[in-house]
Amino acid sequence: MADTKYAPAPTEPPPSYETAAQPTASKPPPLRAPLPLEIPIIASLRDKRVILASASPRRKQLLAQIGLTNLQIIPSPLPENLPKSLSPFEYVLQTATRKATHVYTTEIDNTTLGEPALVLAADTVVVSSLGQLLEKPRSEADHIAMLKMLRNSGYHRVYTAVVAMTPLASARDPGYAIETTVEETVVRFGKEISDEMLMAYVRTREGADKAGGYGIQGVGAILVERIEGSWDNVVGLPLRATLGLIERVVRAGDEEELEDEFGEGAED
């Protein structure tokens, strides 16, 4: 069977990699948030200050799906420049922890808005089958080369670290509770995906702002043959793990407050 032929590129070139990630009026509106989950942990946070230390609209949309719609978006300005010699697990965990602690320490003494009840941060990396950390593509040539490598290697791994922080009621050092988690998902591209298909996808610019150069939640799904693990982990935030993380860190803060009120280790 002859190779599938794709329509020629449009006369007007796609946007540059510097502008592709910027919101424009032509982009579709954000997904409508579902009705909130009626569970105690989500209900307890609805009227409190919850910060997402990330500018990712995908993470914001995923959190809205579990009912966290009153988020304050404060991205960390710290560069993601940790040594690539770190293991993927340590790289994402340390990066997400740096983001969370930076925003937390900046906002904890905010006299106008008050201290946050919860700070969430996350970091996602794509790792080739040879162990190479893949960041966002820098150009169209870099983008097509990245996707070809992912196709030819057969599989790759996606790691997302999530960090949650909440203040403690007492002045007990360090003054906050912190919980972390790292999720791994194995992704396999279809080997039959042609170079023409990859180029057609690259020219959509959907993957220009994403580590690994594709978005599984969008048109990039056509590249994926199968996954092993959490789908939303590939998007950038594993919801089930994140919800468990929030429950643990808030519980830790509540238990510390009770200990402070009634006295730790008090005897009957």
Image: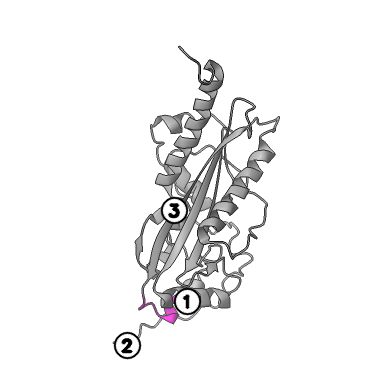
Seen at 53% across and 51% down, the residue is 57
Give the amino acid type for the residue marked by disc 1 in the picture: Met
Q: Is residue 251 visible?
A: yes
Tell me which numbered mark, 3 or 1, is placed earlier along the sequence.
1
Residue 216 image position (x, y, % from top left): 42, 62
Q: Do residues under tags 2 and 3 come within 8 Å of each other at their CB atoms? A: no
Seen at 47% across and 76% down, the residue is 149
Query: Does the magenta-highlighted stretch encompass residue 90?
Result: no
Give the amino acid type for the residue marked by disc 3 in the picture: Glu
Nearest to the eye among marks 3 and 1: give it: 3
In the displayed structure, 161 sits above or below 6; it is above
Give the amino acid type for the residue marked by disc 2 in the picture: Ala
* Quadrant in which the N terminus appears: bottom left
Seen at 50% across and 26% down, the residue is 254
Tell me which numbered mark, 2 or 3, is placed earlier along the sequence.
2
**In the image: residue 148, left or right of residue 107:** left
Residue 264 image position (x, y, % from top left): 53, 21
Q: What segment carries the magenta color?
A: 191-200
The residue sitting at the front extreme is 267
Q: Which residue is mark 3?
A: 183
| Element type at mark 3 | strand
| Element type at mark 2 | loop
Tell me which numbered mark, 1 or 2, is placed earlier along the sequence.
2
> Tag 1: Cα neighbours inside 10 Å, few (<14), some, or many (≥20)?
some
Q: Which residue is mark 1?
A: 149
Q: Which residue is mark 2?
A: 2
* Quadrant in which the C terminus appears: top left
